[in-house]
Amino acid sequence: MEIKEFNIKPSSNRRLLVQQVEQQSVLCDIKVKMGQWERRFHRCVLAASPFFEHAMKSNFRERVTGVIQISVGTPETVEQALMFLYGKKPEITEENVESLLTLAEFLMIENLKSLCINWLRSCDISDEDCITILHLSSVYNFKVPDLNKFIEGHLLRLLQKPQMVILTKDSVEHLLSNRRLTYVSTEEKLKFLARWCTVNTDERKQSVKELLNKIDFDDVDKHVLEDIIQDSPLRDIEVCINALEKRPCNISGNHKVLLVPDGKKKGCFWCLDLNRQEWYRMDYVYFTETYTKIEDLYPKVAGARNSSELYFVNIQYPTRSVFCLNLVTDEWKMYRIVLPTAYRIEHFCMHKDICFACTNCSQPGRNDTSVVYAGYAGRKSFHLSPIFALKDQMICYFCFNESSTLAVVTKSAKCVFLYDFANFKLVKVPLGITAMDKIIPTRNGFVLFNQARCVFISRLMGPCLSREYLIQKISLLMEENSDIKSEFYFCGEYCFRYSEDSMARKLALHYVTHDEMLNTGCANNWKLLPLPGDNENRNKKLFLLGNHMRNSRLGRFMQTSWKNGRQCMVEIPKGKLRCQIDCPHCKVIHRDEFTERDDSDIESYESESSNISSYDCESVDKDSEMSHESDYSETSYESESDYNFDFM
């Protein structure tokens, strides 16, 4: 006997019910319609949805007629959502996920909602679907792990998209005030604010006035400001009018910056802006590519050539050369070092177009001799000539200051030799020098220091002086039996104190000017500086439990970058100081660097404890405001943000 396949009963009740729906059996006792589309289903199955259960039990027309009209979603997604009640998993795509999620919320099918949310969390976020996910997560009150990071890392590009105007006031305020988002220029933020206030202008006008207080108009050129506000509602706001009247035509100001080369990544610098008292990072991509090729020749930053230029030096014969990098124009130039001898250059320094080098000659049976050479920068080279020699002395380091004075420290002499390059005069200053001493130049002298004391050497100017230099000593020793260990570093006109509190497991960075130290000593006037990558919630949790503080990222930075003595005081246009140490945009560009294993400890902590606000959206569809907060046992996720996306 021939048996028809479709008449075979399935092996389970679920499969039987699905087969009845597919065949539109008379046993399907409830009809669901959407426009011209209609399908019959089972009342007992649809009752798993509170929406259908209420419609079929209450005294509604649907209970009598047996027909339920649906106006949410599409016929395809409605059928997928209802078949989900039969145990049939829908195929979720970018095209239907929003409709399915809307239906799951409307029909109150929690498991389907959880399925859609899990799919959204697992998909790769792109520019195209970022706004959609932002919208859905706000409406239906769920969190997507990487959404905040993606928005903050690609904010500069996302701000150009028209959909971003749905952000609420709190989200825009976060955008304007979050220090991690300073890589987006103030001008771009102001342009976005001008577009944002064109939507619901009457409602947002008061909010715009408050948000404009977060704008630093000093960072916006007057002509750019005029172009931004002339055709926007901002033109009638008093804050903008006053800013436009007070702004000069150009703002080419520079900020004084303590620049510290990153000890791990070539071409990357950590910058402490002393005006804003914030840490930034600068990456020179082209310089990094060049530096990688010549890093054997230029292993470290040698110093600052002038207020905005660094120099690197190769003192190995015969490839003696100097590499200069302009921090303002990002241009670099190479000079050859031409010396009238083949002796090894022991030390090298330069200031502007003047450079100095020294050679030490030590031969058996002869006295040790150190020769100092000087020369000016030519078109492609430095031609150096000898200016003086020290017999029975071996120079261990020297430096040159802005007053055209060269300070020389030797191994054996308990003194500092000061050579006046303008008057060709050599002076010997007796001092108790130790092997731990270092010397740095200042505007009008030098600072000789170790971790116990510092000596200020200042040149005196005027007629009929009994001495040419003023010597002032200050003790740097802290209180005995203190749990705080401090280390001192001098750079430019500042003294920096890096301290570790072993009991409280805290680090601190302070600074004081030389004048303040000379007036009040070492105990007072220390000003607290922020730590690299520090924020308000990390003061007491800089290190993971059980790890020594020196193993933290900051500890490694102090060991590899700070203590090598390569800090420089330079002036950089404030427009270049945008990226914070933890800049999300830089993390996108240099993702490999931020996923290194030796940084995994601090990164894992940041993912748990950062207090980064998110963005809210204002709903453009009032009917979608039916979302409610739910706990999904299958899809629970602990977000890194305390401030989440919510539609108003």
Image (tube, grey):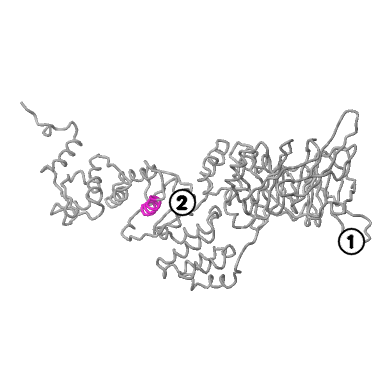
Q: Earlier in the sequence, mark 1 or mark 2?
A: 2
* Residue 500 in sight in this render: no
535 in relation to 599, above or below: below
Give residue 122's position: percent from left, percent from top: 39, 42
Give residue 365's position: percent from left, percent from top: 91, 28
Give residue 101's position: percent from left, percent from top: 31, 49
Q: Which residue is mark 1?
A: 462
Which quarter of the picture shows residue 512? bottom right
* Residue 330 in sight in this render: yes
Q: Which residue is mark 2?
A: 151
User: Residues under labels 1 and 2: Cα distance?
Assistant: 61 Å
53 in relation to 196, above or below: above
Q: Front-most of 156 and 19?
A: 156
Please rate how many residues cluster around mark 1, counting C-alpha atoms within 10 Å: few if below 14, some from 14 to 19, many from 20: few
The reply, left or right, for residue 591 in relation to residue 329 is left
Q: Please, what is the three-letter code of the amino acid marked with disc 2?
A: Ile
Q: Which quarter of the figure is the N terminus placed in?
A: top left
The reply, left or right, for residue 222 in relation to residue 301 is left
Which quarter of the picture shows residue 289? top right
> Which residues are drawn in magenta?
128-140
Q: Nearer the viewer, mark 1 or mark 2?
A: 1
**SS under mark 2:** helix
Which quarter of the picture shows residue 371? top right
Tell me which secondary structure the magenta stretch mostly adopts. helix
